[in-house]
Amino acid sequence: MRAGDLVTPALLADAAVLDRNVATMSAARPGPALRPHVKAFKCTPLAGLLADAGHHGFCCATVREVEGMAAAGLGDDLLLANEVVDPRATARLGALVAAGTARVTVAVDSPEAIDAAVAGGLREVLVDVDVGMPRCGCDPADAGRLADAARAAGLEVRGTMGYEGHLQHVVAATERTARTAKAMAVLTAAHGDVGGDVVSGGGTGTWDCNDVVTELQAGSFVLMDGDYARLGLPFDEGLVVLATAVSVRPGSHAALDAGLKALAMDSGGPTLVDDHDGAASVLFCSDEHTTVAGGQWRVGDRVGLRPDHIDPTMAKHEVLHLVDDATAGGDAEVVESWPIDLRGW
């Protein structure tokens, strides 16, 4: 089958790029030094590829991701790197632990999160520390007290977690490195109060400058996106949304059948795989369409778009089609099709 035989919009992944990116990361962060974050791709077959490369611990963002990974036989060591304070949700996680289908660790940053973990039957936690990104994470000064409270409640505290998400897309490498060191100094001090073997954090943007974490929570590196590509990392873009030109005004513009419902726009608009030697560009995206100009398109042409943010783009699609060359448009050969089976909550 060729990509041109697929109904568009269709999500394509370049198989060779995927293999290269995994090999590059695995060489630098072998085995447990990498805890791939499945939120980036939400696809258990892709997670299985990473397990085959030696990475058997995974990071998740939702209860659904944890359940799906366990069902796929990839539950050796799952970290839900997120606070869960609803006992009904933690009970779903605790059921996996009780059944022996998964080892599940959750992040906690409050007494309420500790209580929910205990109520749900969970046994292991990481203390989540705010290292400068105003999202989840406790005040570093409170990390030791939270660890003591978790242990008093009967939980095992495996260590700490601190995500420098605010630094992942700092373009200047020297600034990114310096600010990451500062953020990780906060985590190191907090870890001294907490104890444990695990220091978890980091991501694709800090893959080569975060030397504090014992496990790197990177995920986007597998196929990359436009936002990360601006950093000049040694990972290639391999994700393409294939669209069809459904309306063409010669000399003016063309409308493609992939828009906001097929492409994440939070980090910026998509770019054309083939920009006709710099003459063509994306004008704007609407619900079902992307309008492009400057090229010589005909109705029915297949046109590739590279998204600027991999995670939410993946979540908009039900299937990921591996192809031999994602830049070949409709001529790309479909090697395999994988379900994006970790969507939902």
Image (spheres, helix red, strand yellow):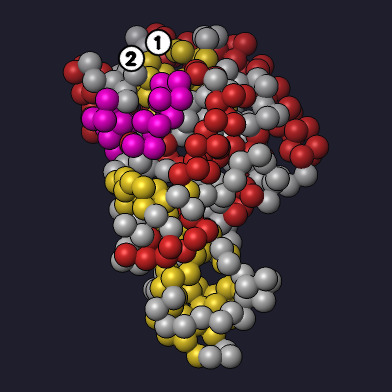
Task: Please tell me whether residue 321 belongs to the stretch shown in magenta.
Answer: no
Q: Up-down: is 306 above or below 315? A: below
Residue toward you, 307 or 181? 307
- Which residue is found at the position 44% from the left and 75% from the top? 301
Side of 68 relative to 189 (left or right): left
Q: Looking at the image, tell me whether mark 2 or mark 1 is earlier in sequence order.
A: 2
Q: Which residues are magenta?
A: 45-73
Q: Label 1, secondary structure: give it.
A: strand
Side of 73 relative to 334 (left or right): left
> Which residue of the protein is positioned furthest toward the right in this rendering?
174
Pick the quarter of the image with the N terminus: bottom left
**Count of labels in the image:** 2
Pick the quarter of the image with the C terminus: top left
Q: Label 2, secondary structure: give it.
A: loop
Q: Which residue is mark 1?
A: 156
Q: Amino acid at mark 2?
A: Arg
Tell me, yes or no, whether the two marked residues, 2 and 1, touch with CB atoms within 8 Å. yes
Q: Quadrant of residue 332?
A: bottom left
Q: Which residue is mark 2?
A: 123
Q: Amino acid at mark 1?
A: Glu
Report x, y in % for residue 230. 68, 51
